[in-house]
């Protein structure tokens, strides 16, 4: 585990891992929206008389535009920590694209000859936000990624209900279940009966709040093979938030003689 970093001793690391790329992007957009709202609300008379501002005023008063930007910025800053952020992304994308289209159209109407410059910038921002909104998000960055797993490690993917979706050859060799036998069955088949109840309770908590303190950590556990025999393992799990809900990726390493996990 990568626990030697000074940053790891502060809550900041936990916040950054919780926010992720989508949340960080929403934070940036939220601050941008607040800055635009301030520029509209407190625009000096000379600036308010420029073509770019007069075009906006012809559609709605500047305080109304400022309110729209402020509300969108506040929504982005709130949802950057939330499990679901689709409303914030949709609102930010819509407002940025609308702003860009208004500037672009004002160029063709002659009301703002240089409006195409601002229009291109705002449309580019809107497209960027729309692109980020399609990214699947990792709830936490794991200390051990599946792609960097040791050769003897099993990588298993499961859905929010704990049903196995993907099963590697290493998992088949470790547990004794073939891919056809494992995929579509619950993860509980890989653990002794005494551990199944706590496992299901933990899944229910993650589904309820979208967060797990175990994500990204190396967890010692007891697993069970297809023949019922038990053996010690070390698990690193990561939760990904996507359009279909939470997906779990687990990297399982056997522990014991010759298989020590560093």
Image (tube, helix red, strand yellow):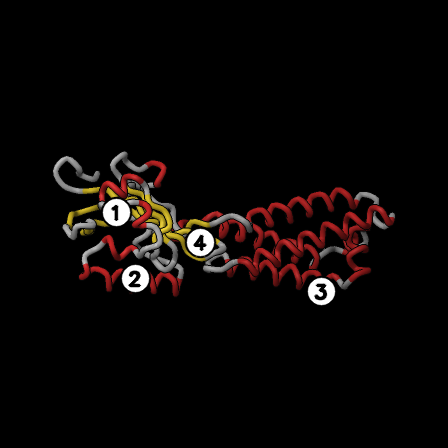
Which residue was labeled with disc 4?
241
Front residue of 123 and 155: 155
Q: CA distance from mark 1 to mark 3?
A: 62 Å
Q: Which mark is residue 140?
A: none
Given this view, does label 1 or label 3 mark the residue nearer the observer?
1
Which residue was labeled with disc 3?
64
Residues packed near mark 1 inside 10 Å, few (<14), some (14 to 19) or many (20 plus): some
Residues packed near mark 2 inside 10 Å, few (<14), some (14 to 19) or many (20 plus): some
> Which residue is at 77% across, 53% downward?
102
Q: Secondary structure at mark 4?
A: strand
Quarter of the image for the N terminus: give it.
top left
Q: Which mark is residue 202?
A: 2
- Kindly indicate whether the residue at mark 3 contacts the one at mark 1 (C-beta within 8 angstroms): no
Q: Is 50 above or below relative to 69? A: above
Q: Left of 140 or right of it: where is 194?
A: left
Q: Secondary structure at mark 2?
A: helix
Residue 160 x %, y %: 38, 58
Q: Left of 170 or right of it: where is 78?
A: right
Q: CA distance from mark 1 to mark 2?
A: 24 Å
Quarter of the image for the C terminus: give it.
top left
Decide if residue 8 is in sight here. no
Which residue was labeled with disc 1?
177
């Amino acid at each position: 585990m990568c626990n030697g970093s000074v940053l790891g001793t502060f809550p900041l690391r936990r916040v950054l891992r919780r926010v992720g790329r989508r949340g960080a992007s929403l934070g940036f957009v939220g601050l941008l929206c607040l800055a635009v709202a301030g520029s509209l609300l407190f625009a000096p008379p000379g600036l308010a008389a420029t073509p770019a501002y007069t075009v906006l005023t012809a559609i709605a008063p500047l305080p109304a535009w400022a309110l729209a930007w402020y509300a969108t910025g506040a929504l982005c800053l709130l949802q950057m920590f939330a499990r679901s952020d689709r409303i914030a992304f949709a609102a930010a994308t819509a407002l940025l694209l609308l702003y860009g289209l208004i500037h672009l159209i004002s160029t063709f109407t002659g009301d703002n000859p240089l409006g195409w410059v601002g229009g291109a910038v705002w449309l580019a921002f809107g497209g960027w936000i729309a692109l980020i909104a399609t990214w699947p998000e990792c709830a936490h960055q794991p200390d051990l990624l599946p792609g960097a797993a040791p050769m003897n490690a099993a990588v298993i993917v499961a859905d929010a209900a704990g049903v196995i979706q993907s099963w590697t050859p290493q998992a088949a060799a470790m547990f004794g279940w073939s891919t056809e036998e494992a995929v579509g069955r619950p993860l509980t088949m890989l653990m002794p009966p005494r551990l199944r109840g706590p496992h299901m309770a933990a899944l229910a908590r993650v589904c309820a709040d979208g967060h797990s303190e175990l994500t990204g950590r190396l967890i010692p556990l007891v697993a069970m093979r297809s023949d019922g025999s038990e053996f010690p393992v070390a698990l690193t799990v990561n939760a990904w938030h996507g359009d279909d809900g939470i997906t779990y990726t687990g990297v399982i390493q056997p522990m014991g003689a010759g298989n020590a996990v560093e």
